[in-house]
Each structure stands twice: as structure tokens, then as C-alpha cells.
Image (cartoon, rainbow, N blue to C red):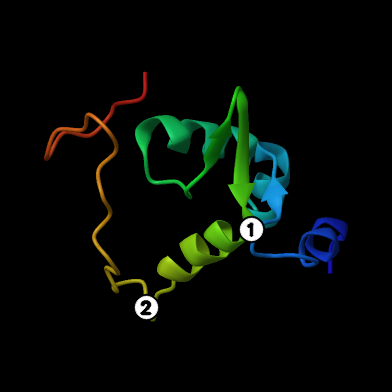
Amino acid sequence: MSEIATTVRTDAMWEMLTTEQAALYLGLSPRTLEKRRTVGGGPPFLKLGRAVRYRLCDLEEWIAQRRRRSTSDPGAVAEPGPGAQPGVFPVRR
């Protein structure tokens, strides 16, 4: 088990992680989490002043919601991000 996983297992309900720690836990890049905070689709986060934190229990719930039985399993319908228009997807330039 990784060092971060060992550290965050102590008090899972309120353990708060930085973006870098949450990214490591999820196997994503910090930049991916930053982008998903902007466009939506990422795990819930807390804004404490200027600091962004993720609760471990929210990350685990977010992971569980993405569980699929096959590649054709659509799972739950994702909610659009704030300000999103139905059927309009952001374009990367």
C-alpha cells in the first residue's frame, strides 16, 4: 500500500487531502482535478478560503459511482457542469 493510502486511512470520514494528494490517491494528474473543478465531472471538493480540499469519503464515493460491469455499461448519467448548455460540449483549443 502506498504511503498516501496508509496516511489517509486513519480517519477517512473527515480526512482532507490537497489536490496533489487527491490526484495521487485517484491515479489522476493534479491538472485533471483542476480542470474538472472548472468544467464539472470531478469529485466534490471543499473551498476553505483559497485552499481546495477533498474529503477522502467523497473521493471513495466518486470512485464507487464510476463502477461498471462492462465497457458498454453507460452507468449513471453525468450531470453537466455549471453554466453548461444541453448538448454543447467544451472544445479544447
Q: Nearer the viewer, residue 26 or 44?
A: 44
Q: Which residue is mark 2?
A: 70
Identify which residue is drawn at 56% across, 65% down: 60
Under tag 2, what secondary structure? loop
Q: Quadrant of residue 19?
A: top right
**Picture quarter with the N terminus:** bottom right
Q: What numbered label is drawn on residue 1? A: none
Residue type, numbered disc 1: Leu
Give the CA distance from mark 1 to mark 2: 26 Å
Residue, far top: 93
Residue 21 visible to the viewer: yes
Residue, far bottom: 69
**Picture quarter with the C terminus:** top left
**In contact (CB < 8 Å): disc 1 and disc 2:** no
* Residue 28 percent location from the top left of the image: 61, 47
Q: Which residue is mark 1?
A: 56
Would residue 77 be found to the left or right of residue 48 on screen?
Answer: left
